[in-house]
Amino acid sequence: MEKSARTTLVIKLISGLIATLSFGIVLVSCQKEEFPDPDTLPNGLTGSWVETNTMADTIRFDSDAQSGYFFLSRGFAMTNGYWLPKIGSAPYSYNIAGDSITVIDGLSSAMEGGTYYFRFDEPNLTIKIGKFCKYIASKKSILTFRKIN
């Protein structure tokens, strides 16, 4: 077998291996996200909720009160050589009134905030809330969060 024929064969084998691995990665990444059994989760708002579109942002309520604080966690990013919370990760004060929620960024020196749509669907373990943080990656104006614990 000539050197160029061997080289061509090796390139074809490597290309086939890369294609097979790529297909496998795509197949695994497209699997449906599994959520915990609803019977194992606390009732009410208390707990952690993940944004269902990007699965990248989480809010945590520490009580079922109609007002108080929740914490938005957006993950971490490398900043000046340190892994720091992504911008927008912060405590937010809130007040729920009917189908709206008033939210104020707890770290903003200007106490920035606003009033947004809010719907708590306890049987389906979801919260629909207006996009209260401009840094959340989803382009949707109303975000859906699903309870995870």
Image: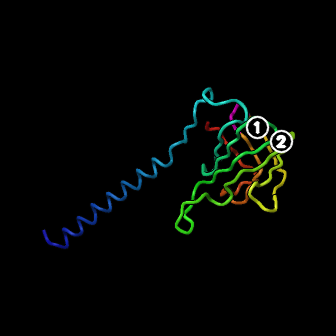
The magenta segment: 122-126
Residue identifier under label 1: 120
State left or right for residue 69 relative to residue 47: right
Residue identifier under label 2: 96
State left or right for residue 89 relative to residue 120: left
> Looking at the image, which residue is at 84% across and 44% down?
100
Is 75 or 121 nearer to us in this picture? 75
Label 1 vs label 2, nearer the camera: 2
Counting labels gives 2
Picture coordinates of residue 88 (x, y %)?
69, 58
Q: Are marks 1 and 2 in contact (CB under 8 Å)?
A: yes
Name above or below for residue 73 compared with residue 110: above
In magenta stretch: residue 25: no
Name above or below for residue 68 compared with residue 11: above
* Residue 45 occupies quadrant: top right
Picture coordinates of residue 56 (x, y %)?
60, 51
Quadrant, the N terminus: bottom left
In magenta stretch: residue 123: yes
Is 137 or 49 nearer to us in this picture? 49
The type of residue carrying mark 1 is: Phe
Is 107 or 148 nearer to us in this picture? 107
Q: Which mark is residue 29?
A: none
- Dot 2, crowdedness within 10 Å: few (<14), some or many (≥20)? some
> Looking at the image, which residue is at 54% across and 60% down?
83
Picture coordinates of residue 76 (x, y %)?
57, 57
> Looking at the image, which residue is at 79% across and 36% down?
65
